[in-house]
Amino acid sequence: IIPIIVYPAPYGTDVYGHLIYTHIMSVTNHLDEFYKYCLYKGYLGYDYPFGLWLFGSIAMKITGLNLYELAFILPFYYFIILLLLYYMYCRILVSDEEALNPNFDIELLSIIFLITSPFLISDIVSYSTSKFMMCLLVLIFYLLVNESVSFWKKFFLLNLSVLVLSFT
């Protein structure tokens, strides 16, 4: 968050390319129009993180965000969702009877370890596929471990998550 305050511009390895394709997807009405526009303009690298662009363009159309706002707001929401999913995942893995001290919240300690990992913190709010995919991966692990979710809900959510993950 401090780098955004000091230098308020999107940063990261392919962030501007992702933002260009997200913008193209947001101004087109269907995928055929997106592909034709990219071929007409000579943008031939549009096969890479399709899920990120699709999700970003849908968010732009629904909320009315511009690219500058999207580059900061969506990764921050990915981070919040990741923290919540990770907390719920850790809560399932460590039950109350297995905890060393009932007054000690091991889930919060795991969140602190997640936040202090250099890989996550180095570009926590960059508009990239790795941040988008981390939420999906933790959701998949959570659904696989959680026994309280019904079979059909788990089946539907796992298939949807794996589908989005496969074209991202």
Image (cartoon, grey):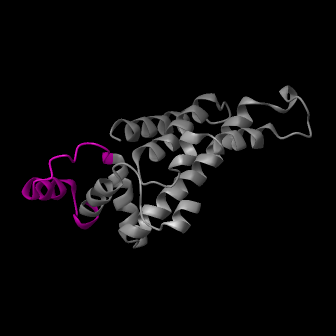
- The residue located at (52%, 64%) in the rendering is 4
Where residue 54 sits: x, y (%)?
33, 54
Q: Relative to residue 137, is residue 14 depicted above or below?
A: below
Q: Is residue 1 visible?
A: no
* Quadrant of residue 5 within the rendered picture: bottom right
Q: Quadrant of the C terminus?
A: top left
Q: Is residue 96 visible?
A: yes
Q: Quadrant of the N terminus?
A: bottom right
Residue 74 lies in the magenta-colored region: no
Furthest residue toward left: 40
Residue 44 lies in the magenta-colored region: yes
Q: Relative to residue 11, is residue 65 depicted above or below?
A: below
Furthest residue toward front: 6
- The residue located at (88%, 39%) in the rendering is 104
Where residue 158 sits: x, y (%)?
49, 35
* Quadrant of residue 85 within the rendered picture: top right
Left or right side of 106 for 22: left
- The residue located at (69%, 39%) in the rendering is 113
The residue nearer to you, when weighing 63 against 115, is 115
Q: Which residues are magenta?
A: 25-50
- The residue located at (49%, 63%) in the rendering is 73
The residue nearer to you, when weighing 115 against 136, is 115
Left or right side of 85 for 110: right
